[in-house]
Image (cartoon, grey):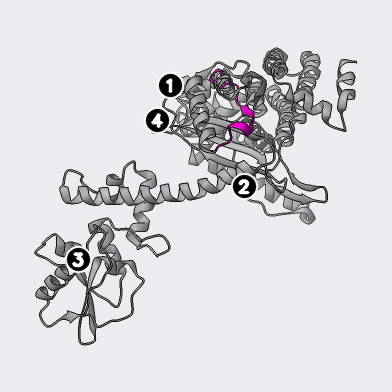
């Protein structure tokens, strides 16, 4: 019978396969080459000899035979799961695309997300030649598949972009992973041949240096790869100074003034303004660094939070509640009791609800502060009761049996949550209500400008629910008018001095970037060309 003509993983040719089958038969007296005529589709047979003894078939590992191991690994051919396990664990052979992987391979792929290298993920020692060969095989096959898939799709994307009837608009931004790997995401926005709005991620190159010239050069390389130099339109970027330089570098290379085509991400501007409103200053990195709230706050962080007014106090409260099972259980118990009381007083309106958790803010998005404030206002009464009950429990646990009072030494250990300077006063709660109202206007503007990203087919054609460039000016105007109205009311607001500072800082940050819109004519041109606005809009603004 002719030998199997399927090459092995390391380029095993027909003659070598025949030699390995002869060697397998030497290890198994009484066994013969398989009489099976039908070609099997399972990939494991590319790495094994197929032998039989009457009605029994066995798979014998060619790789083990080739390594001249004293122990030859074999399995019954009825179930091949063990064969897959052996190929993966001992030789680093993965199931090809379209075939089911074994459990060990699936677990290893999941672990690769948590581990940094192939050798760590597979538990291989590259100092051992055998395991080094396995790791190298996995890496080469893994990279090859990714590159092949990327090249296949890249050609299609290139064709789509070059057929697009209009300009290709580009956005890019940088990000650094926890392992200090810097990446740049480059995306484009355009209308296809059917006039449907589209967006595609073009590349995620590694950012070696975050300077404007390096960023610009990297983006130019991607533009060149996709052949869209002559179709490059406008750029939407955040307010980093390096992006100003990058836009100028790109423009100089492509023959236009990059400054005139440099759009600004209004979401980033709104974030800066909202942080100025909430915390008064925008340069306090120490406070922003401790906004993650993952663990209970130390004394320094706690006092830093108190210095930020009602929002800082609330942040401290939320962190304490979320980091203590005891305090959270007490808050949950209070909510459940309140629900029972409401059911007794109004049985017809009674609805069983799950206790609400407090929402923790973070250093990335100002919306997290808004959601934290909203949830706290919803639980305002429960939080007030929480502090009272927790204080009563703590005093009862630390009361002297002789004097029935809390000794001074114990008071120095009082939980930070119960200290007088940490208490959210009625004025603080009023301040939080006012901030929630102002930030709701910010939230509305953001939602209008970002849209929901859904593509819809209407009678007038395909419509994408994205932010429109003519809405940017109106978004600035809405926010500035809101802040000016509250500025005039500041004297009558709670914590009036802090409010005045916060509103002024928020207004200044917005106005700083509103003036920069003059550098990019597209914002005002879009309003002038819009049939619902035209020049009347500007005459109304000036008038």
Q: Which quadrant of the figure has residue 316?
A: top right
Q: Which residue is mark 4?
A: 180
- Whole-angstrom CA distance, mark 3 to mark 4, is 42 Å
Mark seen at residue 355: 2
> Which tag, 4 or 1, sits closer to the chain's start?
4
In the picture of the structure, the residue carrying the numbered disc 3 is 62
For residue 413, which quarter of the picture? top left
Q: Secondary structure at mark 2?
A: loop
The image position of residue 62, as x and y in percent, is 19, 65
Residue closest to the eye, 513 or 322: 513
Q: Would you call the spot at circle 2 few (<14 residues within 10 Å), some (14-19), or many (20 or more)?
A: some
Count of numbered labels shown in the rendering: 4
Q: Residue at x 45, y 51 (%)?
A: 149
* Residue at 17% in and 51% down: 130
Q: Magenta span covers which residues?
A: 227-243
Q: Quadrant of residue 249?
A: top right
């Amino acid at each position: 019978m002719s030998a199997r003509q399927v090459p092995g993983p390391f380029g095993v040719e027909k003659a070598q396969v025949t030699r390995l089958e002869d060697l397998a038969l030497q290890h198994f007296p009484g066994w013969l080459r398989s009489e099976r005529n039908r070609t099997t589709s399972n990939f494991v047979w590319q790495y094994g000899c197929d032998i039989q003894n009457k009605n029994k078939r066995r798979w014998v590992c060619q790789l083990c035979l080739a390594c001249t191991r004293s122990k030859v690994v074999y399995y019954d051919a009825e179930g091949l799961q063990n064969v897959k396990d052996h190929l993966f664990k001992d030789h680093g052979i993965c199931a090809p695309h379209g075939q089911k992987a074994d459990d060990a391979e699936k677990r290893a792929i999941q672990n690769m997300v948590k581990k940094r290298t192939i050798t760590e993920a597979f538990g291989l020692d590259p100092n051992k030649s055998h395991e080094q060969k396995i790791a190298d095989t996995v890496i080469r096959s893994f990279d090859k598949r990714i590159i092949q898939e990327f090249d296949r799709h890249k050609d299609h994307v290139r064709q789509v972009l070059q057929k697009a009837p209009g300009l290709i608009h580009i956005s890019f931004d940088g990000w650094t992973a926890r392992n200090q790997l810097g990446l740049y995401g480059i995306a484009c926005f355009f209308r296809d041949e059917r006039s449907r709005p589209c967006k595609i991620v073009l590349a995620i190159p590694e950012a070696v240096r975050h300077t404007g010239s390096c960023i610009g050069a990297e983006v130019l390389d991607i533009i060149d790869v996709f052949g869209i130099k002559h179709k490059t339109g406008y750029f939407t970027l955040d307010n980093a100074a390096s992006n100003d330089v990058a836009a100028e570098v790109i423009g100089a290379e492509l023959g236009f003034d990059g400054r005139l085509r440099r759009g600004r991400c209004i979401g980033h501007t709104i974030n800066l303004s909202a942080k100025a409103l909430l915390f008064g200053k925008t340069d306090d990195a120490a406070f922003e660094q401790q906004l993650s709230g993952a663990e209970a706050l130390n004394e320094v962080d706690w006092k830093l939070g108190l210095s930020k007014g009602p929002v800082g106090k609330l942040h401290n409260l939320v962190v304490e509640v979320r980091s203590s099972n005891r305090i959270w259980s007490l808050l949950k118990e209070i909510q459940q009791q309140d629900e029972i009381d409401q059911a007794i007083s109004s049985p017809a309106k009674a609805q069983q609800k799950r206790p609400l958790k407090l929402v923790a803010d973070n250093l990335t998005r100002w919306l997290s502060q808004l959601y934290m404030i909203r949830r706290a206002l919803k639980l305002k009464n429960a939080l007030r009761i929480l502090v009272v009950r927790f204080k009563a429990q703590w005093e009862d646990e630390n009361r002297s049996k002789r004097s029935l009072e809390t000794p001074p030494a114990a008071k120095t250990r009082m939980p930070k949550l119960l200290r007088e300077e940490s208490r959210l006063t009625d004025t603080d709660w009023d301040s939080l209500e006012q901030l929630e109202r102002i930030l709701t206007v910010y939230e509305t503007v953001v939602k209008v400008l970002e849209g929901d990203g859904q593509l819809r087919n209407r009678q007038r054609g395909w419509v994408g629910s994205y932010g429109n460039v003519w809405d940017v000016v109106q978004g600035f105007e809405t926010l500035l008018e809101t802040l000016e109205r509250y500025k005039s009311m500041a004297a009558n607001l709670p914590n009036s001095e802090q409010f005045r500072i916060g509103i002024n800082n928020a207004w200044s940050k917005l106005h700083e970037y509103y003036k920069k819109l003059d550098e990019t004519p597209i914002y005002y041109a879009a309003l002038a060309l819009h049939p619902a606005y035209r020049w009347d809009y500007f005459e109304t603004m000036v008038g």
